Image: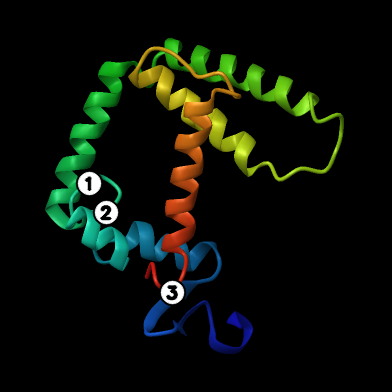
Amino acid sequence: ISERYGPVFTVHLGPRRIVVLCGHEAVKEALVDQAEEFGGRGGQATFDWLFKGYGVAFSNGERAKQLRRFSITTLRDFGVGKRGIEERIQEEVGFLIEALRGTHGAFIDPTFFLSRTVSNVISSIVFGDRFDYENKEFLSLLRMMLGSFQFTATSMGQ
């Protein structure tokens, strides 16, 4: 499509206009050279209704800047950027590798494996402990989160 319309064009997905940037130069111009204009996030009806424009992932403008600044400071207090976090990530990657070896080379969808890994890194930062990959409560929470994300991808969730 970019060969016909150029490196920046608009597509319509239902009632929503989506600006598409193709290539390094177009992305750099938008996100670096014109960061103020392109720094916001698009609306998503379900999240807008649930979070009312609050939250690190769902806010825009000055509120977003303040929340991100606060989050970065808080994460640093938890040890992000320090050796302890790297060790937690490496430890969790070890559990991921062990779980992948347990598939004995079968074709798998890595989504759930990676979700468990990322969730456990976050859990170890926030709570100081990780969940076993087969923990029923942990798996239930992950399924609920996945269900929420899948719903927001539907036309009803938009």
Q: Quadrant of the N terminus?
A: bottom right
First reached walking from the N terminus: tag 3 or tag 2? 2
SS at circle 3: loop
SS at circle 2: loop
Q: Quadrant of the C terminus?
A: bottom left
First reached walking from the N terminus: tag 1 or tag 3? 1
**Front label number (3 vs 2):** 3
Name, please, the residue furthest toward the front.
136
Question: Residue at horizontal 22%, vertical 62%?
Answer: 49
Q: Amino acid at mark 3?
A: Ser
**For residue 19, what is the image quadrant?**
bottom left
Q: Position of residue 68 (x, y in %)?
A: 23, 40
Seen in the picture, residue 64 relative to 81 is either above or below; the reply is: below
Q: Amino acid at mark 1?
A: Gly
- Residue of label 2: 58
- Residue of label 1: 55
Label 1, label 3: how far apart the Cα atoms are: 23 Å
Q: Amino acid at mark 2?
A: Phe
Whether label 1 touches label 2, CB < 8 Å:
yes
Do we see residue 35 in this rendering? no
- Residue of label 3: 155
Question: Residue at horizontal 49%, vertical 24%?
Answer: 120
Label 1, label 2: how far apart the Cα atoms are: 5 Å
**For residue 141, what is the image quadrant?**
top left
For disc 1, the neighbor class at 10 Å (few under 14, some 14 to 19, many from 20) is some
Q: Position of residue 96 (x, y in %)?
A: 66, 25
Seen in the picture, residue 136 relative to 46 is either above or below; the reply is: above
For disc 3, the neighbor class at 10 Å (few under 14, some 14 to 19, many from 20) is few
Q: Position of residue 87 (x, y in %)?
A: 51, 12
**Front label number (1 vs 3):** 3
Q: Nearer the viewer, residue 131 or 33?
A: 131
Name, please, the residue furthest toward the bottom.
4
